[in-house]
Image: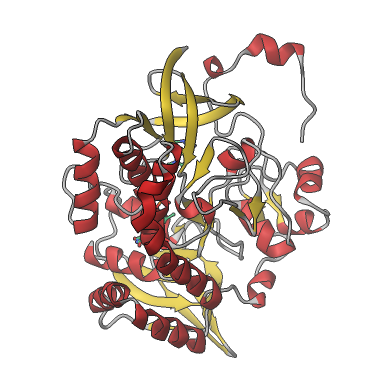
Amino acid sequence: MRELRSEVLVLGAGPAGIAAAVSAERAGARALLVDMQAEPGGQIWRGQWNKATDSTARRWLSALRASPVEGRYGLRLVDVPAPGEFVFDGADGPLRVHCERAVIAAGARERLLPFPGWTLPGVFGAGGLQVLAKNGWPVAGKRIVVAGSGPLLLAAAASLRSLGAQIVLIAEQSGWRDLAAFGSGLLGTPHKVVQAAGLWRKLIGVPYRTGSWVTQALGDNEVRSVIVRRGRQIVQLDCDALAVGYGLVPNTEIARALGCELRDGAVWVDMHQHTSVPGVYCAGEGTGIGGIDQALVQGEIAGCAAAGRAELAATAQRRRRGSERFAAHLRRHFGLRAELRSLAQDDTVLCRCENVAFGAAKACSSMRDARLQTRLGMGHCQARVCGAACEFLFGWGAATPRPPLAPAGLSCFNLSTSAENPQEPT
Ligand SMILES: Cc1cc2nc3c(=O)[nH]c(=O)nc-3n(C[C@H](O)[C@H](O)[C@H](O)COP(=O)(O)OP(=O)(O)OC[C@H]3O[C@@H](n4cnc5c(N)ncnc54)[C@H](O)[C@@H]3O)c2cc1C
């Protein structure tokens, strides 16, 4: 297996990871930046490495290019066999990295909730369809309903529309009071108001309904229409695709595999982004959903601290308070309504990888019980989708992750060791 050594390993090359790696180098440490994507940028700066259109992206991507940070892309973390040891898998086979300190900046994913018809072809995550479309999936001329919750719906709808899609409706589950309070709370952060105004300009003429959610997707081989509920009002809308996502959930698998403490579903960190595990830092959406400003600020703080120069992040520390206020504001106004817990029927698929129905899962007492009884969460995605749904539907905590953290080649593992010490399934 190929081996590499680094002083500071930064896991994830989104805004938080880029800021951490660049800041660690500026603070005098040697940093290695690794990501499973083919180039740096993460979710929001996807595809901007060679042609950044956004000024913040341009600034940070140029800083990364100009810095001596060693970047390794197309490598996915699959195991953490020992403290300071990380195993990645990629097209050229596995890579083992030994490091003194690590910054986890693995971002977030969408929360998808089950409802009748959600597994039909043509039903996507809202951010997922945005990513696919940015990568070339054809949406021009398609009628798309965008639904779920949070500001990502607006960003997704604006991107899809700019690529030629016809947005039939944006259905936001939060009520108008929450939306109005969220909007007025942004007035203290002028650049957020400018961002929001920019999005709304791109969506002029698109119907936007608050207190509305999709209860069913209909179609034989693919989605043809959706049923949308708004209070007592129920409407059926024809469409070619549904883009639906109920906010974001922190990616915590890596931190959990390392034994880091979690609070409220996010990685706990101190003021220097240090987790409960010595030498392990976390920055960005993994510590709680807060958007790009929070990711950048936390990345700078984590990078300096991991380089042993926490004092260099004094300016970032001052900016941190504003980004934390925005994160709290998001949580307060985009909480999910209880009605979303009763959309799935007993025969609605909940775990797509293992084909486990909602009815079978709800008879279980915990994620571990559901794993043992039904294999829920034990397939390809390792509960990345159904785990977040179960947390909302049943209040279950996440199960302990086991290696491999993602599907990986056999050459990533020391097979003789695992054969001698077979472990019971968890
Ligand atoms: C699908 C989606 C679309 C989004 N679209 C928008 C948008 O249009 N506008 C907006 O303002 N915000 C958007 N967001 C939110 C935005 O991603 C964040 O605010 C911001 O990017 C957070 O930066 P980050 O560095 O914390 O995480 P990310 O940008 O998500 O970066 C995390 C990086 O970690 C890497 N990674 C994760 N696990 C592993 C692993 N096991 N091995 C190797 N690498 C790994 C990922 O490939 C990724 O590059 C979106 C989020 C999602 C999930």
Instruction: Compare residues 317 and 191 and report the one nearer the observer.
Output: 317
Q: Is residue 277 left or right of residue 7?
A: right
- Residue farthest to the front, as pictured: 311
Rendered residue at 78%/48% (across/down): 370
Instruction: Compare residues 299 and 235 and report the one nearer the observer.
Output: 299
Q: Is residue 219 visible?
A: no
Residue 378 screen position, x and y as percent: 67, 39
Colouring chosen for the image of the structure: secondary structure
Quadrant of the image for the C terminus?
top right
In the rendered view, tell whether residue 14 sits above or below residue 265. above
Count all numbered tags in the image, as a single digit.
Answer: 0
Rendered residue at 39%/77% (across/down): 169
Q: Is residue 378 left or right of residue 2?
A: right
Instruction: Compare residues 85 and 51 and report the one nearer the observer.
Output: 85
Residue 45 screen position, x and y as percent: 29, 51
Q: Is residue 67 visible?
A: yes
Residue 339 screen position, x and y as percent: 65, 77
Which picture quadrant has residue 297?
bottom left
In the rendered view, tell whether residue 331 sits above or below residue 256. below
Rendered residue at 57%/73% (across/down): 335
In the rendered view, tell whether residue 52 sits above or below residue 34. below
Instruction: Compare residues 2 and 93 and report the one nearer the observer.
Output: 2
Residue 415 screen position, x and y as percent: 64, 12
Rendered residue at 52%/80% (across/down): 174
